[in-house]
Amino acid sequence: MGIFWLILCCLSLATASPESQEHESSNNGTAQLKVYHVRGKGSSLVQNSTWSLSDVLLHDEEHVKALTKRLKKKHVKSPSGSRPKLGHLVKPSSASIPLNPGRSIGSGNYYVKLGLGSPPKFNSMIIDTGSSLSWVQCQPCVVSCYPQVDPLFDPKASTSYKKLSCDSPECSSLKSATLNDPKCTNAGSCLYTASYGDSSVSIGYLSQDSLTLSPSQSLPSFTYGCGQYNEGLFGRASGIVGLARDKLSMITQVSTKYGASFTYCLPTATSGSSGGGFLSIGTVSPSSYKFTPMLKNSQNPSLYFLRLATINVGGQPLRLSPSDYSVPTFIDSGTVITRLPMSMYSVLRDAFVKIMSTKYAKAPAFSILDACFKGNLKTITAVPEISMIFQGGAGLPLGAHNSLIEAENGVTCLAFSNSSGIAIIGNHQQQTFSIAYDVSNSRIGFAPGGCH
Ligand SMILES: *[C@@H]1O[C@H](CO)[C@@H](O)[C@H](O)[C@H]1NC(C)=O
Ligand SMILES: *[C@@H]1O[C@H](CO)[C@@H](O)[C@H](O)[C@H]1NC(C)=O
Ligand SMILES: *[C@@H]1O[C@H](CO)[C@@H](O)[C@H](O)[C@H]1NC(C)=O
């Protein structure tokens, strides 16, 4: 609550002179906020921060805690309506854009470049299937912006920018999109709050502007957040693009043009911009995929739930019961390491370690990863295949690059960890598969060898 109050105070104060470099506060309550003063273009803000796996894993753990909190009830029900149907999936119109690993911008997630405004300014935005509202850091950064790689988005430089008012229908949709109530400024503008755990937040004006996916593909009146107080573990990305299932999600907003479906391939984290990753909106060619039903959880209906049927290690199913597999399970592009409840994780880890330790020496645990071996990905070659099979037979037969992660020089760890009461299929395990979110037909498809 403190944060809402503080930003109300500051936003009404500061917008009068966006060029000013100091924002005085009439109330000493703001003293506890760290205020960055924006000088000219955002590029001068870029700091020297290098990518570190321990930071990424700390962030990942916090992200998972925040997601877990929202899913206290352990009950998954099937989507309303009948079984998934085969449909005519390919829409006349579709868009495909390159998708890059976030390592070069200090993130364990993935980003796309999206154009905002007229003329369009391109922003590196993290793709997140675990949240709905999209936002970018926005001038004049009334309270604070963290350093980012792109110039800061300046709404004043866009001829199509529009702030949304408190009584707009989009403002009323914020509660379900962000799970936080919207707030009003004195002038009647709508304020959103997007929070991602204890220390990551974006607060600002709910806005609309044109969205450019590629030079030939753009949409007017895209609803997103123009962030004035941004803090947290987003690397040096400009913001987040929300791909969950809520009304304000980017996917829902573009569905009238492209249909409610999207596909992506996440390249390996070390592949840079040459990994062939992509995000396609509106294209699912059913023949290439094996599908599993997309489920809905009443605690967070916008996430993409599915049902694990079996996990095999080295061709042998783990000794787990069907009730173990009934744990709420969702797939998330914004979580790095796959999480399983301890009862499942320990069985997986023990089966994997049993086979691995015949060939490789064990190494100490690294952060949340507790099954580590001496060697790097090049030298550890005899890796038992872990295969996650979902209801209906679709699955992720993991390669060594999906099962293992290099923690530090000469230490490589099993890239799974434990969680409490939920399972999350993380992006490390999704790498190089093509994954189709066929929302209109309530099904998720997997195909190996997905990156171009
Ligand atoms: C803020 O604090 C300063 C010193 O701590 C004090 O002089 C000033 O009167 C305070 N301002 C308000 C508005 O409370
Ligand atoms: C950035 O940090 C690295 C590692 O600490 C250092 O080697 C490099 O010189 C720094 N670069 C700049 C521009 O400060
Ligand atoms: C995972 O297991 C470790 C070790 O047993 C425990 O300390 C930690 O709290 C567990 N994490 C979660 C999220 O349950």
Image: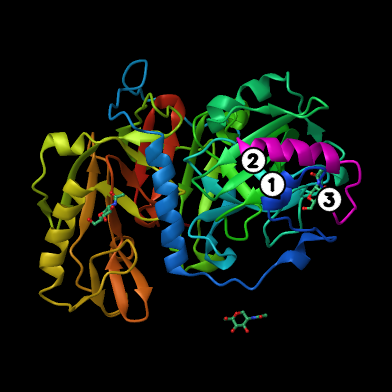
Contact (Cβ within 8 Å) of mark 2 with mark 1: yes
Q: Identify whether 378 is placed above or below 96.
A: below
Q: Is residue 428 left or right of residue 173?
A: left
State the SS at label 3.
Answer: loop
Q: Position of residue 181 (x, y in %)?
A: 60, 27
> What amino acid is found at the position of numbered circle 3 in the picture?
His
- Residue at 49% x, 45% y is 197
The residue at which mark 3 appears reads as: 23
The mark that comes first in sequence, 3 or 1, is 3
The residue at which mark 1 appears reads as: 229
Query: In 3D space, how far apart are the residues under numbered discs 3 and 1 (Cα atoms)?
Result: 13 Å
Q: Nearer the viewer, residue 263 or 413?
A: 413
Visible residue check, residue 335? no
Contact (Cβ within 8 Å) of mark 3 with mark 1: no
Tell me if mark 3 has few (under 14), some (14-19) or many (20+) residues whose alpha carbon lies within 10 angstroms of its own: some
Is 197 within the magenta? no
Q: Is residue 376 left or right of residue 38?
A: left
Q: Position of residue 315 (x, y in %)?
A: 12, 55
- Asked whether mark 2 lies closer than 8 Å to ligand 1, one says no
Residue 85 occupies which quadrant of the picture? top left
The mark that comes first in sequence, 3 or 2, is 2
Farthest-out residue, top: 81
Query: In 3D space, how far apart are the residues under numbered discs 3 and 2 (Cα atoms)?
Result: 17 Å
Q: Nearer the viewer, residue 272 or 13?
A: 13
Which numbered marker is on residue 3? 2
Is 16 within the magenta? yes
Q: Is residue 191 left or right of residue 408?
A: right
Locate the N terminus by quadrant.
top right
